[in-house]
Image: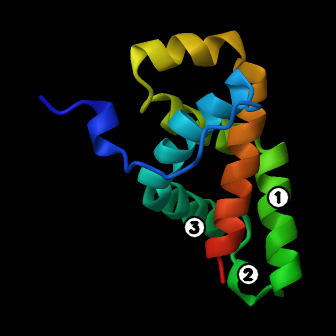
Amino acid sequence: MITKIDLRETLEIPVLETSSAIEQFQNQSLRPVLKLQNELYLKLFSTYCARQNPDFNSLSAAKKRTFIEQSLLKDSVLKNTFIGITIGMLTLSELDLYILESKEYNRRMITMLTERIKDQTK
């Protein structure tokens, strides 16, 4: 049987002795999930843009970046949807770790997602 971890690509991120448990979870669990779900995040954000800002594609690069940042910071429905998509790909043991520091992991997820979307939006 294929597990959620089997679906994820292995990322070559070195584990440093100085890395905190939060950094290790981010690099070993969150980043692979974000990479796996990348197309889904992009499609959902594209749909969101079409509803919220039909002129998004005609904005300058700087304004697009600002719109992306503000959307993921201020639109709680969008933010919680992205967090839910990510959490849904965690294993039960990863979920236990996530619950311990959920506020910090959510902040890191949104930061990473913001950068991912900005980097892939032209």
Q: Secondary structure at mark 3?
A: helix
Residue 66, compared with residue 77, is above or below; it is: below
Element under label 2? loop
Instruction: Identify which residue is drawn at 69% across, 76% down.
Output: 54
- In the image, farthest residue toward the front: 17
Left or right of 42, for residue 69? right
Where is 59 relative to 16, above or below? Answer: below
Residue 27 horizontal side relative to residue 85, left or right: right
Query: What's the amino acid at mark 1?
Result: Glu
18 over 74 or under it: above or below? above
Q: Position of residue 96 (x, y in %)?
A: 54, 10
Query: Residue 60, located in which quarter of the rendered image?
Result: bottom right
Dot 3 corresponds to which residue?
46
Q: CA distance from mark 2 to mark 3?
A: 12 Å
Check the picture and name the quadrant holding the C terminus: bottom right
Give the camera-side residue of 98 and 16.
16
User: For the point 61% across and 74% down, which residue is it?
Assistant: 120
Tag 3: residue type? Answer: Ser
Residues packed near mark 2 inside 10 Å, few (<14), some (14 to 19) or many (20 plus): few
Q: Earlier in the sequence, mark 1 or mark 2?
A: 2
- Residue marked by disc 2: 55
Residue wearing tag 1: 69
The residue closer to the viewer here, 113 or 48, is 113
Q: Quadrant of residue 121?
A: bottom right
103 up-or-down from 26: above or below:
above
Q: Secondary structure at mark 1?
A: helix
What distance separates the C-alpha of mark 1 from that of mark 3? 14 Å
The circle on residue 14 is: none
